Image: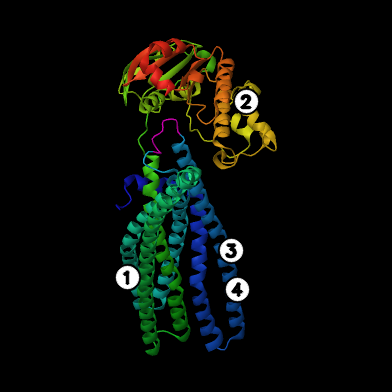
């Protein structure tokens, strides 16, 4: 796994820059806290020299009071600094999650390519948290640096050799800690990648559990997940070992360094170069230095993990868009489009030179002998991809020449496997419906009102995650009702009734024709019940238009069409 790339570093810089205020507050108050921590052994040493060794009770009481004031100050400094640092960390993670969500849901697409949904969820949660934690790491690093500097200055005043020892030894320790964090960074990136992949596979298995049980593939699915989960566990253990090794070695080096400081201070005291109080202060400062140096070990680990996670986030944010957004003008109202579609020598995927005119208000059926042709057509009409050659025109204008938001608002492509959302049946149907939508008519046309009547609370009944509280046929009808309620100028529906019985399918066909009267509708289906209600049917064979005409005439006159819809 390669190190975080420049775009990953850019994510880190923007994340830290966006939380500058809280980080500054946290760093300043953290510096005050660390300064107070460093002054504690100094005040104790002065109290020993002037109050204990000198036998001066008022001086002893004075310096004990000063010690109490220092403790109060460092306590408030810690509370304010920790709160500001946590706020910066959580805010940065939230902003990253918002940016990731916006990029994944952007009309231009492209961010989901190569990523499973569960993997994207891991990036938006765990990786965002780790990058956000870098804000706290910066606060801690600045605070720890202040503590080290104050400790070094005090030691220089007590003894030049002790101060130099700290000033020269600390950068060496920090550099060694940085080198020791390199393996952790690499293994952390691998750990997050494997964990995200395992989450994605788990989400896919859960969503397809009913299908797996239906075909008896539970054992194979469990074996597959066990293998992927074991890979994730192995990567996690390797990262944990790297982190433990890094922290252990840094702790050992830190302990050896502090032992050296204490040894030098003790020798100076025995020679009379420093007083008893100064020796107490020196030993106390040496013990105090354990805190800042240990914090630097933690900071190095957080930065290593943050850089690895930032690279994964950057890969999503910087993903190449599937289609350009189009010109910036707009948005235009739905009423400005008549719904005339034209395909000019369209070539994409398995389609080759397709020419097709769809009049405003026409109910057109499209029959394909190859499912890949249907998929390619839907991608072009929805502008999930631009054709290799030719164009799709809306009211005489090629789709790339229109703002992408206008295209998506005007042409709605409803896939046959469209999933429902968490919420009630009514909330799903009205998710994209305008204020003027006739929701009851849409429910009736899709026969989703019949579904509602079988539920305990009617349309107010929750459908569960991805609609799993409903059967396949019920989900399909609710999804169709949602598309009809959206009432777009152009509606493209792909196999809307594959999971219902023949009688219901015929009723749905009549309902679609009624509720879409005067609006352009394209039914991509091989269902004769649906095709019988269309104004015209087009047959695509081998990626080209093989026949066009009335459904009943084509059934009698065209053998290829008859085979496609009746077998």
Helix, strand or loop status at disc 3: helix
Q: Earlier in the sequence, mark 4 or mark 2?
A: 4
Alpha carbon of mark 1 to alpha carbon of mark 3: how far?
A: 31 Å
Question: Which quarter of the figure has residue 155?
Answer: bottom left
- Tell me which residue sits at (57%, 59%) in the image: 80
- Tell me which residue sits at (42%, 45%) in the image: 14
The reply to whether residue 393 is visible in this rendering is no
Q: Earlier in the sequence, mark 1 or mark 4?
A: 4
Alpha carbon of mark 1 to alpha carbon of mark 2: how far?
A: 77 Å
Helix, strand or loop status at disc 2: helix
Position in image of residue 452 (x %, y %): 66, 32
Q: Is residue 284 above or below residue 545?
A: below
Residue that carries the numbered disc 1 in the rendered image: 168
- Which residue is at the front of the view, 233 or 517? 517
For discs 1 and 2, the disc positioned in front in the rendered view: 2
Residue that carries the numbered disc 3 in the rendered image: 76
Q: Residue 443: which numbered mark, if any?
A: 2
Q: Residue 68: which numbered mark, if any?
A: 4
Magenta-colored span? 106-112
């Amino acid at each position: 796994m390669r190190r975080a790339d420049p775009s990953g570093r850019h994510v880190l810089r923007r994340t830290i820059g966006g939380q500058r205020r809280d980080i500054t507050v946290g760093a300043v108050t953290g510096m005050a806290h660390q300064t107070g921590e460093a002054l504690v052994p100094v005040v104790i040493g002065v109290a020993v020299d002037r109050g204990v060794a000198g036998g001066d009770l008022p001086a002893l009481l004075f310096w004990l009071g000063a010690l109490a004031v220092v403790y109060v100050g460092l306590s408030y400094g810690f509370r304010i600094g920790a709160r500001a640092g946590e706020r910066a960390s959580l805010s940065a993670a939230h902003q990253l999650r918002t940016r990731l969500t916006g990029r994944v849901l952007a009309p231009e697409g492209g961010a989901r390519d190569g990523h499973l949904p569960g993997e994207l969820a891991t990036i938006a949660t765990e990786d965002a948290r780790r990058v956000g934690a870098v804000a706290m790491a910066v606060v801690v690093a600045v605070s720890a640096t202040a503590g080290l500097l104050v400790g070094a200055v005090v030691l220089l005043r007590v003894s030049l050799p002790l101060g130099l020892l700290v000033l020269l030894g600390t950068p060496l320790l920090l550099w060694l800690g940085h080198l020791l964090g390199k393996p952790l960074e690499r293994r952390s990136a691998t750990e997050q990648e494997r964990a995200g992949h395992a989450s994605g596979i788990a989400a896919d298995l859960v969503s397809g559990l009913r299908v797996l049980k239906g075909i008896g593939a539970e054992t194979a699915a469990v074996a597959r997940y066990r293998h992927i989960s074991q890979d994730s566990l192995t990567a996690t253990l390797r990262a944990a070992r790297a982190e433990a090794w890094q922290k252990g070695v840094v702790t050992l080096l830190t302990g050896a360094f502090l032992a050296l400081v204490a040894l030098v201070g003790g020798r100076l005291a025995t020679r009379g170069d420093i007083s008893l109080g100064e020796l107490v202060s020196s030993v106390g400062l040496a013990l105090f230095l354990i805190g800042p140096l240990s914090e630097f070990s933690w900071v190095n680990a957080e930065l290593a993990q943050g850089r690895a996670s930032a690279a994964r986030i950057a890969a999503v944010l910087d993903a190449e868009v599937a289609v350009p957004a189009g010109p910036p003008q707009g948005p235009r109202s739905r009423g400005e489009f008549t719904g005339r579609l034209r395909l000019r020598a369209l070539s994409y995927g398995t389609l080759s030179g397709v020419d097709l005119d769809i009049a405003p208000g026409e109910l057109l059926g499209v029959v394909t002998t190859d499912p890949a042709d249907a998929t390619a057509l839907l991608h072009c009409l929805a502008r999930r991809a631009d054709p290799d050659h030719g164009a799709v025109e809306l009211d005489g204008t090629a789709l790339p020449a229109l703002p992408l938001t206008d295209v998506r608002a005007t042409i709605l492509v409803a896939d046959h496997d469209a999933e429902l959302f968490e919420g009630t049946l009514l909330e799903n149907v009205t998710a994209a419906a305008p204020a003027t939508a006739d929701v009851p008519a849409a429910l009736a046309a899709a026969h989703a009102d019949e579904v509602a009547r079988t539920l305990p609370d009617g349309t107010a009944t929750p459908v569960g995650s991805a609609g799993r509280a409903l059967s396949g046929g019920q989900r399909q009808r609710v999804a169709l009702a949602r598309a009809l309620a959206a009432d777009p100028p152009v509606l493209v529906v792909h196999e809307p009734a594959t999971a219902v019985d023949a009688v219901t399918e015929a009723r749905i066909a009549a309902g679609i024709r009624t509720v879409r009267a005067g609006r352009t509708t394209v039914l991509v289906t091989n269902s004769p019940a649906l095709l019988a209600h269309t104004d015209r049917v087009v047959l695509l064979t081998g990626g080209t238009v093989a026949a066009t005409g009335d459904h009943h005439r084509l059934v009698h006159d065209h053998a290829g069409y008859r085979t496609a819809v009746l077998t």
